[in-house]
Image (cartoon, helix red, strand yellow):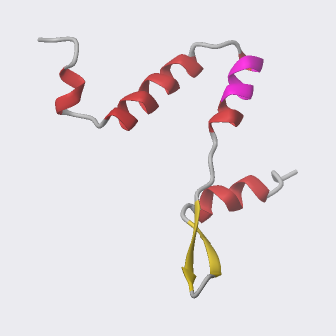
Amino acid sequence: MSSATWRGVFTFNKYSQITAQAVRSCLKESERLAAEKRGLTALRYQKWENGKGGEQVLLNPAREESKNKTPPV
């Protein structure tokens, strides 16, 4: 087996996501939490017609909503 056998199974983005998660899991608690916060991304798109932007659509609304919720007391 070659060192690049992941190419037959994963895309490069999936491979880098898996390796980043492995690295973050090896960090100390405080550094791990900071790294996980940096890893969160929100992706929105907007359809433009006649030079004007339409409504922005959030691609992963569950993650955005959970980020805005306060934890139960």
Give how far across and how far down residue 63 sits, in percent: 62, 55
Q: Residue at x 24, y 25 (%)?
A: 6
In terms of depth relative to the viewer, which is nearer, 59 or 49?
49
In terms of depth relative to the viewer, which is nearer, 34 or 47?
47
Determine whether, in the image, residue 8 is placed left or right of residue 43.
left
Prevalent SS, magenta region: helix
> From what the image shows, is residue 36 above or below residue 58?
above
**Magenta stretch holds residue 7:** no
Dividing the picture into quadrants, the one containing residue 51 is bottom right
In terms of depth relative to the viewer, which is nearer, 53 or 23?
53
> From what the image shows, is residue 69 above or below residue 25?
below
Q: Residue furthest front?
A: 51
> The magenta stretch spans which residues?
30-35
Determine whether, in the image, residue 11 is placed left or right of residue 71.
left
Give how far across and how far down residue 15 sits, in percent: 36, 29
Determine whether, in the image, residue 33 is placed left or right of residue 54.
right
Image quarter (top left, top right, bottom left or bottom right) of the N terminus: top left
Determine whether, in the image, residue 4 is placed left or right of residue 35.
left
Dividing the picture into quadrants, the one containing residue 14 is top left
> From what the image shows, is residue 47 above or below residue 34?
below
> From what the image shows, is residue 18 above or below residue 25?
below
Q: Residue at x 29, y 37 (%)?
A: 11
Q: Residue furthest right?
A: 73
**Magenta stretch holds residue 33:** yes
